Image: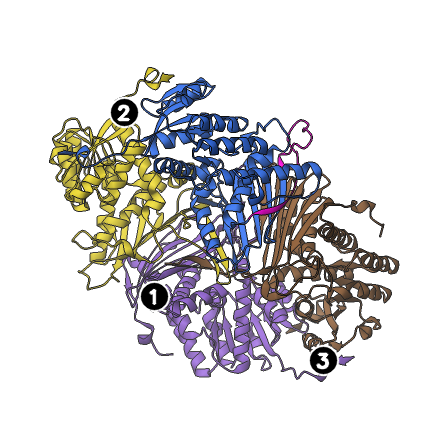
Chain colours: A brown, B blue, C yellow, D purple
Amino acid sequence: MKGTEEVLNVDEPIRVALIGAGQMGLWHARSLAHDIEQAELAAVADPDEDAARRAAALAPGARWSAGPEAILSDPSLRAVVIASPDAAHAGLIERAAQAGKDIFCEKPLATDLAEADAALAAVATHGVKLQIGFQRRFDPAYQRAREVIAAGELGPVELAVATTRDPLEAGRPGLGRDAAIFIQTTIHDLDSLRFLTGLEVVQVYATGSYFGEGSAEEDEADTAAVVLRFQTGALATITNSWRTAYGYDVQVEVMGPLGKLQVGYDRQTAVRQFSAQGVCHDHVYWYIDRFGAAYRREMEHFVDCVARGVGPDVGGADARAAQALAEAAARSLREGRPIDVPPPSLAPVL
Amino acid sequence: MKGTEEVLNVDEPIRVALIGAGQMGLWHARSLAHDIEQAELAAVADPDEDAARRAAALAPGARWSAGPEAILSDPSLRAVVIASPDAAHAGLIERAAQAGKDIFCEKPLATDLAEADAALAAVATHGVKLQIGFQRRFDPAYQRAREVIAAGELGPVELAVATTRDPLEAGRPGLGRDAAIFIQTTIHDLDSLRFLTGLEVVQVYATGSYFGEGSAEEDEADTAAVVLRFQTGALATITNSWRTAYGYDVQVEVMGPLGKLQVGYDRQTAVRQFSAQGVCHDHVYWYIDRFGAAYRREMEHFVDCVARGVGPDVGGADARAAQALAEAAARSLREGRPIDVPPPSLAPVL
Amino acid sequence: MKGTEEVLNVDEPIRVALIGAGQMGLWHARSLAHDIEQAELAAVADPDEDAARRAAALAPGARWSAGPEAILSDPSLRAVVIASPDAAHAGLIERAAQAGKDIFCEKPLATDLAEADAALAAVATHGVKLQIGFQRRFDPAYQRAREVIAAGELGPVELAVATTRDPLEAGRPGLGRDAAIFIQTTIHDLDSLRFLTGLEVVQVYATGSYFGEGSAEEDEADTAAVVLRFQTGALATITNSWRTAYGYDVQVEVMGPLGKLQVGYDRQTAVRQFSAQGVCHDHVYWYIDRFGAAYRREMEHFVDCVARGVGPDVGGADARAAQALAEAAARSLREGRPIDVPPPSLAPVL
Amino acid sequence: MKGTEEVLNVDEPIRVALIGAGQMGLWHARSLAHDIEQAELAAVADPDEDAARRAAALAPGARWSAGPEAILSDPSLRAVVIASPDAAHAGLIERAAQAGKDIFCEKPLATDLAEADAALAAVATHGVKLQIGFQRRFDPAYQRAREVIAAGELGPVELAVATTRDPLEAGRPGLGRDAAIFIQTTIHDLDSLRFLTGLEVVQVYATGSYFGEGSAEEDEADTAAVVLRFQTGALATITNSWRTAYGYDVQVEVMGPLGKLQVGYDRQTAVRQFSAQGVCHDHVYWYIDRFGAAYRREMEHFVDCVARGVGPDVGGADARAAQALAEAAARSLREGRPIDVPPPSLAPVL
């Protein structure tokens, strides 16, 4: 019997470290440990030591720590995946860039645009790769939709309607600041619409309401409605909520003069039950149910880019553009008027 | 063999006249002539004499004329159905009210609020009944949705998304004025959302674009996006277009903390074809395909109200409220800012 | 003002009589009285005098009686619609044919093939028109499916699956004989499959079970499964039940080497409700909900054929073919083996 | 930084060998190499040496060979996965059982019942575990359906309709014998229906046709229709084809007096395209698209059973029962009559 080592010349795997081992980080850890052959999950850091240990246990030999220092100072680690709380993203990007590591960071890039620009400057200065976790870009349905639109099958886009809603049960820590819904949730729709249409937004109108328990801070919202105007005159609406009873609800529709596309589905299990009460099926409940494979595919893309030394498809410029639109939405909510947005080409060069 | 005249004491039918025998008017003529036992289509007026004659031919003995004078002066006609061009609605309502006739008028009530108020004042002065053609209120799906919401099955409404789009092929004469899309099309969504949620709108933001051929008048739009804020903080978005390739597209979704409702369907014929190219079915194309039965039912309701001497479910106050919101949308488009709307209780009493 | 009588030369309507004013007969009465301009509902007979009177009341001047004699002997009545209990169909066809009247008869043609042939012989002898109530042939979805298949878009048909199920609540008087389900229910699928595929059946295998209350007669079934072999080798299965909790369930699927068609839908009202319990909608419940328009259209076709003096699209030959297949199914159930069926061209010439 | 080896006491993985590295075997190899932590893919055998090498390359250190001897004689290998051509299954089960290895074998167990019984006798004699690859039992939709039925939510099952169809493009080597479709394809429906209903079949009627190119052997079929009668009188139909243009088509419907369940879906990608030609989406094309996760989960179950030393949920008795029904179907086709089947309790004890 012959051994495979005779016939294969396997590349050294990319040693990747995870910073932040919550629900999302743990999913990325699994992808790195089990699904992506090119990668090795080599280290995990999380202030919650149990979480760090649990994620590290997924890969033989992976080490763990509470803080990120041991990771950032270990030259054998080529890349880091940042899945810490949103407020820490920008600072960790800066530190990882200074340490010369390629970076995958969960969205959002930062909690405001100044922070974002500082992080992107560090990335540029140190010449590392940066990918942002806009996982929808790796979902087959979004990719197919983009292809159809780019091929002109709808004609020029005129109108779009996007929905992202999370279950009430998921809770929302927010960012300790107003209008967090735009940075945490709307940002996915802002990026998706840029991705699908290939167009840039020139004006944002946003408003929101708070229906949760207790009294809301000024401008705090758990429900939002947004209107975008693109450079071509195309319009889009976005609605967001953190309060669904029925699950995770992500849909988008894009229309041009030749037709429209609808992206999304609502059934989780392929069963429908018919009874005297009607016809019923279940609903997608968690974001992992809808986008689990896309999270794996974005991580594969990142590891592949690191291995090949090329920049990821969804990098700093896309992250900054979505961030700028989310900020404009927050400002629109505060000021009660539509906000003009400079096109990305006029934004600070990165 | 026995005759039915021995056993039945049939009431005299309501003699109804039609003013305006275009596509919509002809549909109403058919309902009156064939489907509504209580009604008799007795006269038709249309400047297009062929159209008038064709509609009158649906009912034995119905008379026709080019102008509405013969109708308005004929005391045997108890009610009129106004399906003339939008710009003529308010004036005809006034004249019919002065003539003492009960009135069914296609939406919109008027082309602006001043006209609307004049028409409603005439209705009030002369004590006639007025029903406006918001046919969705007579669609079983909208009625079921309203019941579910009113029963509290969604909890208090927090968010809604409405869509009304017409085929490009349908064309659009417009009103000879800017922002006609709000008066002609958005108005259906404005009324539907009031009907479904039972809530009043306090603020409107609207914007629009023009993608049609030729150059647009200032503020002319064939594509629109609207955000509504209701008195409770609930939010809604509306998108409208006059440019679909695929047909007539009417959908609405209403969400509260206990769930959401989706109203709408897209398939016209109950056939799906599976081939190497995928799975395909047709789409509802004309508004009559979607709401033909609702148009009949609204007319039945009108005739029944006339016969019983009671006010219709959807009368002047609802028509004025939708009109005021459509006007606010047009103003928002012109001024580029959200417009506060006084609640109907603060509007001029009718 | 001008009267329509000046411009129209209206034909005399066809005077039609109804025999049997149960649920189905009442629906036909409504179509004749209100929807079909060419027809006049002139007389109704039903042993249940209240039922006869109620149906006659739909049309001014219509007369009613308990027995059919007054109808059959009235030369002013040009056509009869037979919607009496199944066991009376064949006898009434014979009598109506002898009376020289064109005949629309609800399916089945007869309760056995000998009776059917006697009835068809009378129709042939007296030269009257006969249409059988296979209303699916007048449903837009079935018509579209037939066109697609006839155009070769599926290639030669290879396989089909048909379902017809009725709500338990509808009850089933049966025919006072065994295997009534094949004559009453399966016959719709037998005709549909012939209509859709354009093929003739050469072998039938059928079996059944009885799940209702009480003890079943030998060979009585309320649940059935059937396999058909067509002349080309194409195969089809049919399942039937009289015991659904969820409503009226009619679906058919036809496959060839280039694709398949699915005909059917299950939602009645265009509303879906999303909650913590999942996503639910209602189901079509009564056959009238699914095929109400098709029943009207078949009656229009009948009246139009009578007026033009031509034979209806679905006449004696089709009725006999379906009857022969239903009989073969009953015999297969009794004998526990597949039954060969002579192609219609070898059946007694009618 | 701490190593995970300090905190975890990882069990030795189960060393598993793969025999047969075609499309299905390769999928299992991936699951064993990447997805199932408890397992190690340690060896692969396939007469196609390239295929063997490619599968072995998935796991570091895995060895490969053309024949199975090296695997069967290696005591370090605890379990084998048999994914060789159908005709080799039973013989390999016997040899693996003699070698003391736990066995996962793709369906079918054997190509006839005598072979199957010999294989099962070897399994019993040597006391090894056997799991058969009825992957649908590991699909969440089938599992959910079984739970609903077992909980009595449909009432006692009365009627079922099952469909399994493969794309023409997939080709079909057959078994070098007649009626192979029942052993290769129908067997999935036979097992699914037993699994879902919990009932045993007492009679089978089957027929088939051949539409492929060239002339068919006697009794060869690429299209089949089957009727099952269960011990309770419940009935089921099955249709199978190897000739779809549109993809992989697996659906099942189970009905009782309280309702029905439909299991299945047809859309692969969550996109619908609306155009002037209608509304279209893609279709599930390959069996892996529909059941990829179920194949992984059945392998996890097998490895877990091996590790825990317990018998799998779907073992020899279920495999034999489905085999006996497939044989009865083949015999029914040959003899042109329904075939009675002894209930499994009367079958040779294993």
User: Do the residues at discs 2 and 1 belong to one chain?
Assistant: no
Range drawn in magenta? B200-223
Chain at numbered mark 1: D
Say which residue appears at 81% left-offset and 75% top-offset: A70
Local crowd at mark 1 within 10 Å, few (<14), some, or many (≥20)? some
Question: For the residues tagged 1 and 3, is the chain the same?
Answer: yes
Amino acid residing under circle 3: Thr
Kindly identify which chain the residue marked by label 3 belongs to: D
The circle on residue D4 is 3
Give the alpha-carbon distance from disc 1 to disc 3, as whole Å: 52 Å
Q: Which mark is residue C308?
A: 2
What mark, if any, has residue A330 been given in the picture? none
The quarter holding residue C44 reads top left
Residue at image x 85%, y 67%?
A99
Residue nearer the viewer, C349 or D145: D145
Q: Secondary structure at mark 1?
A: loop
Which of discs 3 and 2 lies nearer the camera? The answer is 2
Mark 1 = which residue? Answer: D155
Callout 2: few (<14), some (14-19), or many (20+) C-alpha neighbours within 10 Å? few
Q: Is residue B208 magenta?
A: yes
Distance from the alpha carbon under mark 2 to that under mark 1: 53 Å
Secondary element at image label 2? helix
In the rendered view, tell whether residue C72 sits above or below residue A316. Answer: above
The residue at the point 67 percent across, 51 percent down is A207
Task: Give the amino acid type for the residue marked by disc 1 in the picture.
Answer: Gly
Labels 1 & 3 near each other (Cβ < 8 A): no
Across and down, in percent, residue C40 comes to 25, 29
Q: Nearer the viewer, residue B176 or A343?
A: B176
| Residue C278 in the image, given as x and y percentages of width and height | 49, 60
Q: Earlier in the sequence, mark 1 or mark 3?
A: 3
Q: Is residue A269 magenta?
A: no
